[in-house]
Amino acid sequence: MSSQRSGCEKRKRKACNEAELLKIKTSAENTTDSIFNSSKQCENNQLYSDDSMYFYYKTINLTNFNFVMVLMFLSIASAENTTDSIFNSSKQSENKELYSDDINMVNVYDPVNPFSKDRLEFQNRILKGRYKPILDLYPRSLQNSKKRSFQKNWYDIFDWLEYSDASDTAFCFPCRCFKGNEINSSDSESTFSSNGFKAWYRAIDAFKKHQSSKCHLNSAKALTDFINLKSIDCVLDKNRLEEISIKEKDRLKNREFMNRIIDIIICLGKSGRPFYGHDEKSDSCNQGVFKELVILLTKYDVVLQDHLQEAPKNALYTSNRIQNDLITSIKNVILQNIKYNIQNLFISIMADETTDVGHFEQLSIVFRYFDEKKNRPVEIYITLKRMQSVTARAIFDCLHDVLILMGKDWHSVLSVCFDGASTMAGKIGGVQTKCKEQNSNIKYIHCYAHCLNLALVDSKKISKDVGIKLLTLKSCSITRWACRAEAVKSVLNNYEVLLLAIEKNCESSSVPEMCAKGMGLKYQLKSFDFIFGLYLLNPMLNIILKTSSLLQSPNMDLVLAVNSVQSLVQNLMAMRNSDEEFRNIYQQSVELCHKNGVQVPEVINRKVSTQIDKT
């Protein structure tokens, strides 16, 4: 009732305003005619000059107020539908809700204006919702002999409806947003999406019909999906993050697997074991030490088991190429650590050349430096180089290349340590001379271990000259004479077993040559001289072996080396001059001879000279 009453009052007020405006319009027309007639009497035809207007005002006896009103309604009379335009514009300016930030700018939210092609602006426009200005009175137009207009209560009935106050038309917000959707390509309606609807007399039926149309349903669903679902860039970012997360998990898992493979390689490298097998096929009984260790650990390690079962067959990382690459990588890491440790330090170079089982010349290089953290000298093995030539120039070039590789130069080298060969120690063209050409302060040190071996070889030659025979089972290396201590000790501890083995071989063998060698070897073993030589050499070689091992220790320094050699000489001299030590050796030899049926020669006492030396 209240709404009907307010509507009647508005219509009455509008009718009164129209009547008043009609009276003013009529008086304005009459005033215009009188002004036109009086202007004919003027000499100048300037109708709108200030003087003529003042003359007209005096002539027709108008007041200032009427004169102003005449001028105002002259401009109003030229417009069409003046009364309706003034009334409607005044109401719209008071009640219209503007969606734009600046009132002087074009209202971009009005449905007559197309959406922006920019994706972000389009998204922001949709999030703001439909455009529904609330007016006290919407513009009315004559339809079916009645004036009709848009009703604001339609907003509540149809949640998709929006109104354009600029064109006085209605639009569908979902259809306007997604009229170009692929699903709506054949069912699009231009009335509610582009042109606008204005037939207010059948608005309810048209709205209901459009609301149930396939085009509207598809557009509404697209709008809901657009609002609820994330944008394509968010989806792509999420997928990218998920992909990165999966790759990160795979990377960490692969690292755990590679850590185990690297540990296996380091273990085999430290123990000096071969990696490859003669037959590494899956059905082989022995696939090599590396693969056999991997198979063994797979039974107890989940990481290895999952990788070998799930990984592609071409990415198991157990092939010989991967092993070589890992060995090279480990070598590079070790060299980098060594390079870091010896930077800004003085070093000494130790090098020695030897022939391997393949008859290739190999040069081993060791660096020695003082570690301040450990407070002692440290020896580090650097590399083993195969030499195509063993000349002094070739060896020196090899040492120079290794120095450059480790980031050092010859000015940081204090001394070089080689054996006594002329190629290494020659004063004219040897390696030590070429090193001193680079740095004159370099000292040459003759290896103490080589010096000891040379002394032992010389002592053997002296014993032959004196007439002392040292019997051994096998010939040993001349440069490693101290290694015979193990051979002497093994023969001494297994003397009886060796005799039984030789006798059995001689009896069972049908080869005359082997039987003859066996009988000759048995004869040598069952001699007093051989047994006495065993007991005599055993304590001597044990002392020499300890000194030799001490001289080869990486913690050895010059003072300790000199003291060790002097102590060895003193011990040997004490054994030589000790009668008690000789009696013990002789007594042990006699007991072993009696136990094995070996004849002991009679002791001939030395004759003491009774002649008095008168001098």
Image: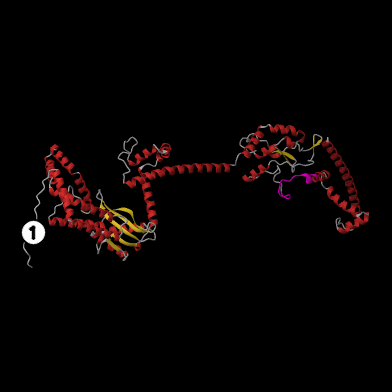
| Residue at the extreme left of the image, as rendered | 611
Indicate yes or no whether the magenta region holds residue 95. yes
Amino acid type for the residue under numbered disc 1: Val
- Name the main secondary structure of what is drawn in magenta: loop
Q: Position of residue 228 (x, y in %)?
A: 62, 38
Residue at the spot x=17%, y=40% of the render?
501
Q: Is 427 on the left or on the right of 153, as rendered?
A: left
Q: Nearer the viewer, residue 54 or 37?
A: 54
User: Can the viewer see residue 431 in this picture?
Assistant: no
- In this picture the colour scheme is secondary structure
Q: Position of residue 554 (x, y in %)?
A: 31, 55
Q: Which residues are magenta?
A: 91-105
Quarter the N terminus occupies = top right
Q: Position of residue 232 (x, y in %)?
A: 58, 42
Disc 1 marks which residue?
608
Residue at the spot x=39%, y=61% of the render?
344
